Image (spheres, rainbow, N blue to C red):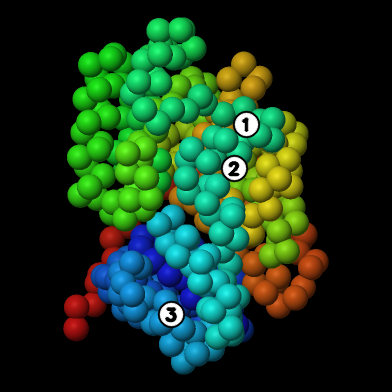
Amino acid sequence: MNILFTCAGRRNYLINYFKKAIGNDGKIFAVDKDLSAPAMIDADVSLLVSNIYDENYIEELKTIIKNHSIKAIISLNDLELPILSKHKDELEACGAKVLVSSEKVIDITFDKLETFNFIKSIGLETPLTYTTLEDVKIALKNDEIEFPLVVKPRWGSASIGLSFPESIEELELSFKLLNIRLKKSVLNTASLKDFDHAIIIQEKIEGIEYGMDIVNNFETDYYGTFVREKHKMRCGETDKALSVIDDRFEKLGNQLSNHLKHLGSLDCDVILKKNKIFIIECNPRFGGGYPFSHEAGINTAAIYIEWLKGNKNVDHFNNYESGKLFSKCDRIIEINTN
């Protein structure tokens, strides 16, 4: 039962959660283009690979699967999800189950304009979304939206390029600056799909922010929704959060799951405003807020292991409690340079 984490990065907590869950039944492998990535330190085996956009990347993963009897692959990077989804069949032919959603699901969630269209099509709430300055200015003139607004990449990750303009002048400057930055950032390759419409502008919903882990099994059937109220954010990730159990979120998670049919855990950001829940963003992977859910009693890592073994009885790993407040803190680790 060897499990491979790709684009391991800084997600040490996931490596350690899975190491504890797997016990003596297997090893946790981690790969990254940088051997000094913090999560590589905690893995049982760490391996260097090429950049995800390198033409040899998939072949390198195939070799690792075969040489190390990898049972499953879990990606921790938004930008990698479309690549793994596209090559899912050939990777699984090597013997590893790729725990990534279908290309259709990835297309919907990775493209924030498609996310907006999808959420509206299933009757749920989401912020009004535009891709041109002209359309936004018309909407402002018609009082459809008002400042402040949200400007961000259409194909984005980790809150890169996020801004909140409060005037026409700020809006135009934010839009122009992000256009320049996209060409220089890691988001450039993804944005080339439609660079003229690679930036979205949304209405800013003011309310209480929550993170939701919406978990489906590996047949994409709904398992449960685990919610945390965000008390503090830092660098686009939740830094302090309180666990919540509320039927409104359970109903929303079930509805979104049944329409989207994602695989595994979906990290979903929502805002509660006047008893309406607005879906802000959906990422079909473990998110930075997962540790708060895990520590509050839902051991999704152990559930994944059981599902990989073919066991369906996993409810004993679900002991989620409301009212649990947790905060992240930093730790320092030594990187072996030899």
Viewer-proximal residue among 85 and 38 = 85
Residue identified by numbered label 2: 212
Residue bearing the label numbered 1: 120
How packed is label 2: few (under 14 Cα within 10 Å), some, or many (20 or more)?
many
Say what amino acid the circle numbered 3 marks: Leu
The residue drawn where x is 49% and y is 75% is 4
Can you give x and y, in whole percent of width and height, for residue 105 in the image?
A: 59, 53
* Callout 3: SS: helix
Q: Name the residue under label 3.
A: 61
Is 166 positioned to the left or the right of 325 in the image? left
C-beta proximity under 8 Å, tags 3 and 2: no
Looking at the rendered structure, the secondary structure element under dot 2 is strand
Res 210 quadrant in image: top right
Amino acid on which disc 2 is placed: Met
Q: Is residue 24 above or below residue 87?
A: below
- Is residue 119 toward the left or the right of residue 49 in the image? right
Residue at the bottom extreme, as displayed: 67
Q: How crowded is mark 1: few (under 14 residues within 10 Å), some or many (20 or more)?
A: some
Between marks 1 and 3, how big is the CA–CA gap?
37 Å
Mark sitting earlier along the chain (3/2) = 3
In the picture, the disc for residue 172 is none
Q: Distance from label 3 to label 2 (Cα)?
A: 30 Å
Mark 1 or mark 2: name the one nearer the start of the chain.
Answer: 1
Kind of residue at disc 1: Lys
Image spot of residue 319 (x, y percent): 71, 53
Note whether residue 167 is visible. Answer: yes
Contact between marks 1 and 3 (CB within 8 A): the answer is no
Whichever of callouts 1 and 3 sits on the residue coming sooner in the sequence is 3
Question: Label 3: few (<14), some or many (≥20) within 10 Å?
Answer: many
Q: Quadrant of the C terminus?
A: bottom left
Q: Which of marks 1 and 3 is in front?
A: 1
Where 225 falls versus 76 (above or below)?
above
